[in-house]
């Protein structure tokens, strides 16, 4: 039997060459190809949300309340920010705990108890009258139900103290007590004038703060602290004013504390504020993208 004829080897396949190389061989300039552009939205620049994140903060070298460093003459202790009594026992982990001077901490203990009793109303707790640190008030503002509120709770001062603690935790630096700040709480505020309650109106700048912070949250241009099973959320972003001065825009939400307010008579609102301060290294810088304001609550950055 004759042996089969040998087949010629297959011709090598031509390799594809980049357009620039092919154009160079042909003696003509390369045509620029389409460029791929990827838009990257940075997530939280600094995020604290686990006990592992919080643990190193217990070794800060300064007291965030007075701003002084710790020395051999001053005894230090730990301060929960916010206090643990604000939260249900099932929600007390992870917690933000910062070192403070013992004397500084003692001065704030009454405020912690007052706010703990106040926020417990959200959980349906009943504080015995003889133990109440605040006083319940009521007024007839018209309508089917009388207005009910509390007095004796210095919310702005208490929240500002926590904001200084959050600042120390995120940036490892002191935020001075004397720093000017603007703050809106989730609760309508009234002054008693001539036996009647005069409520403070919400201003347009408060709405602008809430809308601006919401856009920073949407695009991830925030630093964030999430503690106590996610029931405490603090976010902030750093921007510049028209004259170029830097400031921090922040928001705070504890549980759904806005539900303690009378939203039938007053517009729903969140806790939002600002304070001027040099932008810390590595802090989240805000964006100027404007979002439509029809899909969420105008005065609450979290809703």
Image (cartoon, rainbow, N blue to C red):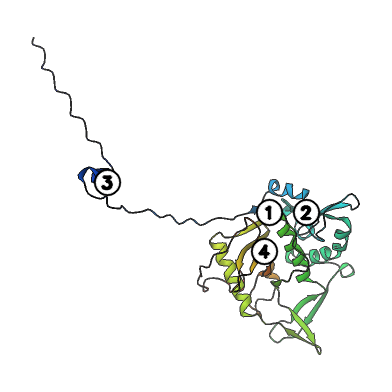
Q: Is residue 167 above or below residue 151?
A: above
Residue farthest to the front, as pictured: 27
Q: Classify residue 292 as left or right of residue 280.
A: left
Which badge, 1 or 4, comes first in the chain's sequence?
Answer: 1
Pointer 2 local density, CA inside 10 Å: few below 14, some 14–19, many at least 20 = many
Q: 98 or 190: nearer the eye? A: 98
User: Taking 202 as reference, is 15 left or right?
Assistant: left
SS of the residue under disc 1 = loop
Alpha carbons under labels 2 and 4: distance apart: 22 Å
Q: Which residue is mark 3?
A: 19
Mark 2 / mark 4, whichever is N-terminal = 2
Q: Who comes first in sequence, dot 2 or dot 3?
A: 3
Q: Mark 3 vs mark 1: give the one in front.
A: 3
Can residue 184 be seen by looking at this rendering? no
Q: Which residue is mark 2?
A: 98
Name the foreground residue: 101 vs 241: 241
**Residue 30 position in % (x across, y down):** 27, 50
Mark 2 or mark 1: which comes first in sequence? Answer: 2
In this rendering, the label closer to the viewer, 1 or 4: 4
Q: Residue at x 57, y 64 (%)?
A: 286
Q: Position of residue 173 (x, y in %)?
A: 73, 57
Q: Are marks 1 and 4 in contact (CB under 8 Å)?
A: no
Could you classify mark 4 by the number of other residues whose Cα lies within 10 Å: few (under 14), some (14-19), or many (20 or more)?
few
Q: Determine if residue 223 is in view.
A: yes
Q: To which residue does mark 1 refer?
A: 229
User: Which is more foreground, mark 2 or mark 1?
Assistant: 2
Q: Which residue is mark 4?
A: 278
Camera-near label (2 vs 4) is: 4
User: Residue 272's quadrant in the figure?
Assistant: bottom right
Is label 3 in a helix, a strand or a loop? Answer: helix
Marks 2 and 1, Cα distance to the nearest angstrom? 18 Å
* Quadrant location, the N terminus: top left
């Amino acid at each position: 039997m004759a042996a089969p004829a040998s087949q010629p080897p297959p011709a090598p396949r031509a390799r594809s060459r980049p357009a620039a190389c092919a154009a160079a061989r042909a003696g003509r300039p390369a045509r620029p190809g389409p460029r791929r552009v990827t838009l990257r939205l940075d997530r939280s620049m600094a995020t604290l949300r686990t006990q592992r994140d919080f643990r190193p903060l217990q070794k800060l070298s300064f007291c965030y309340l007075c701003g002084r460093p710790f020395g051999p003459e001053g005894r230090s202790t730990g301060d929960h920010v916010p206090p643990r009594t604000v939260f249900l026992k099932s929600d007390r982990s992870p917690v933000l705990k910062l070192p403070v001077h013992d004397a500084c901490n003692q001065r704030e203990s009454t405020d912690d108890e007052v706010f703990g009793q106040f926020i417990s109303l959200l959980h349906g707790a009943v504080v015995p009258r003889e133990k109440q640190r605040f006083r319940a008030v009521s007024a007839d503002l018209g309508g089917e139900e009388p207005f009910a509120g509390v007095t004796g709770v210095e919310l702005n001062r208490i929240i500002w103290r926590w904001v200084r603690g959050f600042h120390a935790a995120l940036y490892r630096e002191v935020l001075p007590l004397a720093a000017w700040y603007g703050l809106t709480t989730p609760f309508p505020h009234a002054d008693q004038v001539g036996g009647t309650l005069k409520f403070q109106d919400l201003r347009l700048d408060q709405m602008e703060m809430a809308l601006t912070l919401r856009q920073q949250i949407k695009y991830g241009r925030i630093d964030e602290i999430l503690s106590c099973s996610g029931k405490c959320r603090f976010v902030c972003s750093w921007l510049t004013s028209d004259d170029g001065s830097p400031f921090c825009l922040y928001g705070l939400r504890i549980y759904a504390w806005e539900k303690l307010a009378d939203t039938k008579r007053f517009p729903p609102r969140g806790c939002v504020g600002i304070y001027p301060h040099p932008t810390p290294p590595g802090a989240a810088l805000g964006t100027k993208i404007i979002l439509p304001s029809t899909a969420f609550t105008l005065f609450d950055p979290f809703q």
